[in-house]
Image (tube, rainbow, N blue to C red):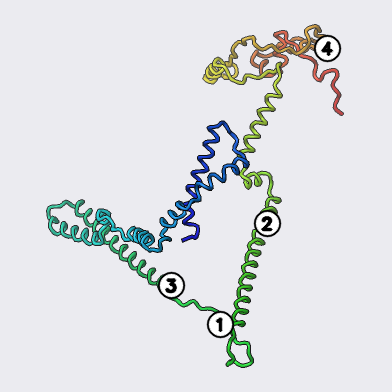
Amino acid sequence: MASSSPLDVGVFQPLKVAQQKAIREALLDGQLRFSRADFLASFQRTFDEGFTSHNIMSGFEKTGIFPPISEPAVRRLLIEQGKLKKAINPAYESLLPKESRFLNASDTLREVQDKYRDILSSPTRAGLRTASRVVTEASVMELNIKLFLADRDKRIEKLNNRRKRGKAVKPSGQFFTSSVSLDQIREQSKATTKAEAKKQIRAQLRMSQRWLKQEMESLRQQKTLNFKQWLDHTRKHEQFINLENNNKEYKRLLNEREDCFFFDTQKSAAIDEAIRNASQAYRPILAMEWPASDASVEITTQRLDQQPSDRDSFISTSEDEPDEEIQLGTPLDTAMTAPAWALLSSDGITLPSSPPRSATPCP
């Protein structure tokens, strides 16, 4: 028991109560700040209330130091021993599995098979055989566990009872018959302790060196990685994908134009219907009838303020070229042999000259 135990029991607790009483009185007087000077001013009063002869003697009596009797200490030891020797509730023991449970189950299954074999169906008999095999397997497993635990306890006991062999102190004299002095034993003990400490220090240094080499090798591997491998190594590929998507969104927002246009590539139902009808005809190309335009798209090939000249027109005729050569053949032959610009000339659509005037001729 500590030497200050009587003071803890009989003095310090009343001293603490007296100090708390002084603080409460100061708060009731309106003094919200209790400084060191206030503590020193109230310390003498609290000390006189705590360190009294009655409190000191009460502490010695409660700890059993005075009068010198062993009854309090013995009573405390008996209480502790009673806690260790407390009987276990028998209800807990009934909850534990019985050691003969597998043997009883095997006997019950064998009795059922022998008694009701003739009246049981084939699936029921097969189930009983399966249950019997499971019970046998459980019995073997329990036996192996018991043998393993017994062997483990035996090895632990053998290890605990083994003699702890130390290093023998060699005599330092010239002959083996010389005795070993106490100073030699102390010197060898110091040398052994020093060698063990040096060995532990070297082991710690080796561990630190091994960790340093691993870090250096990791840095070298990161240096040889490409960007994708580096992302996988640092596990930042998901973050990079989010950043890349955000960057694309910012680019799209920054590149938006008010006068932008787009092409509608969706085919209308009328075109699909025309293609279907033309494919069923005898001559699909001639039977193809394009639907009328909705006049939503207007294509101009030249400026409206300029009139097409005779040189840019594709339908102008020459005096040296007779008109009869154009009219020869059937309309189908004319459509198949005539170029596309000749067919467009009948509607009055004109195109600029190709190549244009400002184009640079090919070498």
* Element at label 2: helix
| Mark 1 or 4: the one toward you | 1
Name the residue carrying label 3: 160
Mark 1 and mark 4 in contact? Answer it, CB < 8 Å: no
Disc on the earlier residue, 1 or 4 = 1
Q: Could you tell me how far apart the alpha carbons at marks 3 and 2 are, in whole angstroms?
A: 45 Å
Q: Could you tell me how far apart the alpha carbons at marks 1 and 4 are, in whole angstroms?
A: 124 Å
Query: In the rendered view, would you say 196 is above or below 213?
Result: below
Q: Which residue type carries mark 1?
A: Ala
Q: Could you tell me how far apart the alpha carbons at marks 2 and 1 are, in whole angstroms?
A: 46 Å
Q: Which residue type carries mark 3?
A: Asn
Instruction: Please name whichever residue, 89 or 157, is drawn nearer the observer in this view of the structure.
Output: 89
Disc on the earlier residue, 4 or 3 = 3
Q: Which residue type carries mark 4?
A: Arg
* Element at label 1: loop
Q: What's the residue at 49%, 54% (across, down)?
A: 7
| Mark 2 or 1: the one toward you | 1
Structural crowding at the residue carrying mark 3, measured as other residues with C-alpha within 10 Å and reported as few (<14), some (14–19) or many (≥20) = few
Name the residue carrying label 2: 217
Q: What's the residue at 22%, 58% (across, down)?
A: 105
Residue 143 in the figure: left or right of residue 219: left
Which numbered marker is on residue 311?
A: 4
Q: Which residue type carries mark 2?
A: Glu
Disc on the earlier residue, 2 or 1 = 1
Q: Could you tell me how far apart the alpha carbons at marks 4 and 3 are, in whole angstroms?
A: 119 Å
Instruction: Please name whichever residue, 303 or 162, is drawn nearer the observer in this view of the structure.
Output: 162
Quarter of the view holding residue 196: bottom right
